[in-house]
Amino acid sequence: MNNKLMVKTVLIDDYMKFKGGAKGKDEILTNYHISKMPKEHTPLELFLISLANCYGGTLSGILLKNMVEVSNLSIEAVGIRKKIHPTCFEKIKLNIYITSNDIGKLNLDKILKSVESICPVVSMIKNEVLIEKEVIL
């Protein structure tokens, strides 16, 4: 595994619209000008997507390792921002939707603690942002 990740972003308009990505991968458009309701994602929306994808990928891997067959797994991340600058997240709620006939045989609390110790995005923010989780079966 390479310890170094690199992305690049470039301003593409006269205000706050950027394109960026990692070498050899599809570019992503972002727009920080939230007052104009852009069609592109904001950086904080992309962060929530990254968190949900990391959490979901880690959870999926653990369930697979425990031979739990999952017919549906989706994660909704809801971020609550601070009212003063910097308006970063003070709380994020993860709604975890799992459909599985096998899930009852596992200790879900133990699995979720494992996810938190493995997912690098959670590890980066868990001491700074309150993360609440709700599992919906």
Image (cartoon, grey):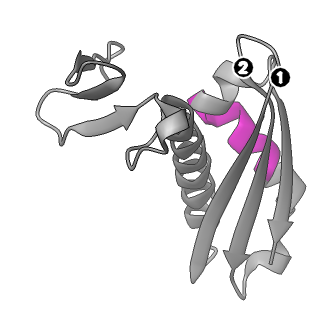
Quarter-of-image position of residue 8: top left
Which residue type carries mark 2? Thr
Q: CA distance from mark 2 to mark 1?
A: 6 Å
44 w.r.t. 5: above or below? below
Q: Is residue 3 toward the left or the right of residue 97 in the image?
A: left
In the rendered image, the residue lying farthest to the bottom is 101
Residue at screen point 49% across, 45% down: 37
Instruction: Report the magenta residues as a range.
Output: 112-120
- At 26% from the left edge and 19% from the top edge, which residue is drawn? 9
Quadrant including the C terminus: bottom right
The residue indicated by pointer 2 is 87
Is 79 on the left-hand or right-hand side of 83? left
In the rendered view, tell whether residue 91 sits above or below residue 113: above
Residue 70 visible in the snapshot:
no
Q: Is 116 one of the magenta-colored residues?
A: yes
In the picture, the disc for residue 133 is: none
Label 2 sits on a secondary structure element that is loop
**Residue 58: where, in percent of width, then height?**
58, 48
Do residues under tags 2 and 1 come within 8 Å of each other at their CB atoms? yes
For label 1, the residue is 83
Q: Is residue 68 magenta?
A: no
